[in-house]
Image (cartoon, rainbow, N blue to C red):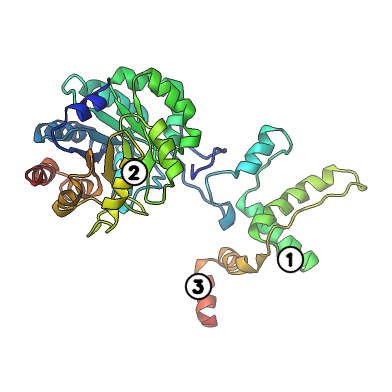
Amino acid sequence: MHGCLSYLLQDNNGQIKETYSIAAGLDYPGVGPEHSFYKEKNRAEYVSIGDKEALSAFFLLSEIEGIIPALESAHAIAYCAKLAPKLSKDKIIIINLSGRGDKDVEEVAIKVRGQESGVRSRNKDE
Amino acid sequence: MNRIERAFRERERPLLIPYITCGDPSLEWTGRLILSLEKAGCGIIELGIPFSDPIADGPIIQSACNRALKQGVSLRKAISFVLNLRKKTEIPLVFLSYYNPIYKYGLSNFADDAKSAGIDGLIVPDLPVEEGKPLRNLLSKNGISLIYLLAPTSTEKRIKMVNRESSGFIYYVSLLGVTGIREGLSKSLGIEILRIKRLSNKPICVGFGISEPSHVREIKDLVDGIIIGSKIVSLIAKNPGSPDKAVIPFVSSMFPLY
């Protein structure tokens, strides 16, 4: 799809399925060719994280480190929080924080406070 | 020689090639429309396989795809539809399908089943020539044409490559953009067609944006076939109860022009 031969969310007839993710950058039915290649070569292991877990991780990093992660990156943080307790203390985990969450603050506010109050606070800003 | 090649060899005037989406508004209507279009004098039928992400199509054909998908039409259903229709007509039938449904179906299975059904050609708008060898070889073994597209931006090198790899005909996209109804044709379209013809020995059919009798009059002496899609699909959309009553008079009105 879209010129790429890669993993896709599709049905048995090759029709592309509708997607949804809290992170706009993940709201796409295809996987980039580079990631598809890493998976084919077993160079990386891929796991999934749901919207709620990502949202908690968004707060976790914001509150503990004062760094607001992009919702996309928050998925990685959520997995890190799952993985870390299973590893010994001397292991080091590196997360690539691929984007900043300033862009997502409004979306998160709407999600957390509910649609209505999010819209109201936006109107007040204007 | 397949039905497409024969149609161009025997043509007395440029072939009129209507595009309809398979299953819009229903498979039954698609069958009736094809038979009526043949009777009206059309030379080839281009049958669109509905796809969720038709990147070369404008809003009119996108909506037709959605209507057909809601009818549950898939590549598999379209192939068995043609298998049945072939008992009633010998008109050349060309599928327009995006690559993913074919890839998912399996290239080899597709080539075999398309042959058994009596499909004569295939247009895959999102398949570049460079990636097309595996499909082309399988189709060619089964006597099915793989029709590539050229656009106003195609370089001389690319025109030659497409001419070499394309079979049946070459689809010339008249504009930079997606399918749809346009008021006028590009002013340089005539020169562009002549440029392609100088570098190619395959029939050239022009499509995208051709929607008015005046457009047909403008290019009829330059091309081997004229493809009309969105205009016909819009007539079907406006007359879902009896699409033939709008489509056939429109198509018939093109013939006195040439």
At x 23% / y 50%, what residue is drawn?
B210
Q: Position of residue A94 (x, y in %)?
A: 81, 51
Disc 1 crowd rating (10 Å Cα; few below 14, some 14-19, many 20+) is: some
| Residue topped by disc 3 | A119
**On the rendered image, what quadrant is the C terminus of chain B found in?**
top left
> What whole-number distance in Å separates the C-alpha atoms at marks 2 and 1?
60 Å
- Tag 2: amino acid: Ile
> What whole-number distance in Å separates the C-alpha atoms at marks 3 and 2?
55 Å
Q: Are marks 1 and 3 on the same chain?
A: yes
**On the rendered image, what quadrant is the N terminus of chain B found in?**
top left
Q: Is residue B106 visible?
A: no
Q: Is residue B119 visible?
A: yes
At x 59% / y 68%, what residue is drawn?
A109
| Residue topped by disc 1 | A62
- Contact between marks 3 and 2 (CB within 8 A): the answer is no
| Residue topped by disc 2 | B196
> Which chain is indicated by disc 3?
A
Which of the two marks, 2 or 1, is nearer to us in this view? 2
Q: Residue furthest left?
A: B256
**Near-viewer residue (A103 or A123):** A103
- Tag 3: amino acid: Val
Disc 2 crowd rating (10 Å Cα; few below 14, some 14-19, many 20+) is: many
